[in-house]
Image (tube, helix red, strand yellow):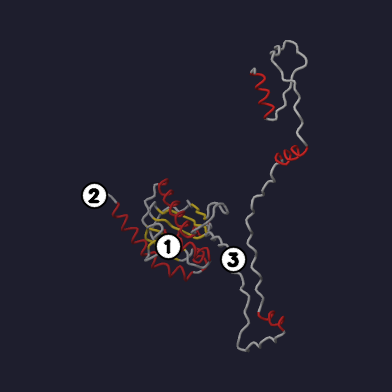
Amino acid sequence: MTPEVARRHYLDAMGITGWVARYQLPNARPTEACEWDETPQAAPPPRERLQALLDDAPAPRAEPARPRQAEPPPASASPSAVRALLGQPAPEVPATQEAEKPVEPAARPSPATPARPLHFTLSCVCIGNRWLSLHPGELTPQAQRLLGNLLLAAGIEQDVTEVTQFKWPPMANTFAVEEPLEEAREGLSAFIAGSASRKQWALERVLWWGGAESESVADTLRVLNVQDAQSQTLALPLWQGPALEHLLQSGEAKRALWPMLSALAQAWQARAKQDAPHGD
């Protein structure tokens, strides 16, 4: 038996139909000559064909087992409902027994209120590059002339025409404020240190003219952090007198101020003598 005939028998046994070309296509390789078995196969009897169909039928696909879902537990019936079904009367509730109150959900914490920044204005006048005169708010021309006259009466002849203003906060509604007081103190300290560096100030003392009549003035005093006649923010001794606007309206306040001005004059002259050159 030639290999071609054997291959055909194998294909028939496997149920694969063999096809033979009836026509030779152009430029196709000629079919190899072989001995073909032209004997037709005997048809199987009907019973065998039916059994073959049953054997070749694909088995039904087994569906994957689905996980059993946990059945919800039966709702627990209340004792009163069970007694109603059984026809029993409901027991009386003692008067001392309090009815259960529904549990209210916990209230959500309210968001933290943003801190309020401090708002104040300071007018700064440097006296002889040694003493820093501070005034709450804007210094009016009348108050400025009064300051010069008071110093002149005390024997301190210095120019007080140059006024520098410090406003806090420098840019409103720009930055979030976490610690208003500490930030204001750092801002004032940096401003005074920068001004002293640019203008060659050698500060020895702070003169504060003002009480605590308004909220802004009180905030300014908190920023200066006055303790034991010392400004902790500026690290300088602090002398405190009445507001210049109050002195403009009260002669009695001027007379009460005179002893304090005399003490200032003595301190100024004592330091001037120390700085004066000694003669040979």
Residue position for label 2: 279
Drawn side of residue 126 relative to residue 44, left or right: left
- Whole-percent x and y of residue 42? 76, 29
- Residue placed at 72% from the left, 20% from the top? 37
Q: Secondary structure at mark 3?
A: loop
- Whole-percent x and y of residue 7? 65, 22
Cα distance in 3D space between marks 1 and 2: 42 Å
- Whole-percent x and y of residue 93? 64, 87
- Residue placed at 61% from the left, 69% from the top? 105
Above/below status of 47 relative to 268: above
Cα distance in 3D space between marks 1 and 3: 38 Å
- Residue placed at 45% from the left, 51% from the top? 191
- Residue placed at 64% from the left, 54% from the top? 66
Q: Disc 1 or disc 2, which is closer to the eye?
A: 1
Q: Residue furthest left?
A: 280
Q: Disc 3 or disc 2, which is closer to the eye?
A: 3
Q: Secondary structure at mark 1?
A: loop
Q: Earlier in the sequence, mark 3 or mark 2?
A: 3
Q: Quadrant of residue 5?
A: top right
The amino acid type found where label 3 is placed reads Arg
Residue position for label 3: 108
Q: 157 or 235, which lies in front?
A: 235
Cα distance in 3D space between marks 3 and 2: 79 Å
Which image quarter is the N terminus in?
A: top right
Q: Quadrant of residue 35?
A: top right
Residue position for label 1: 225
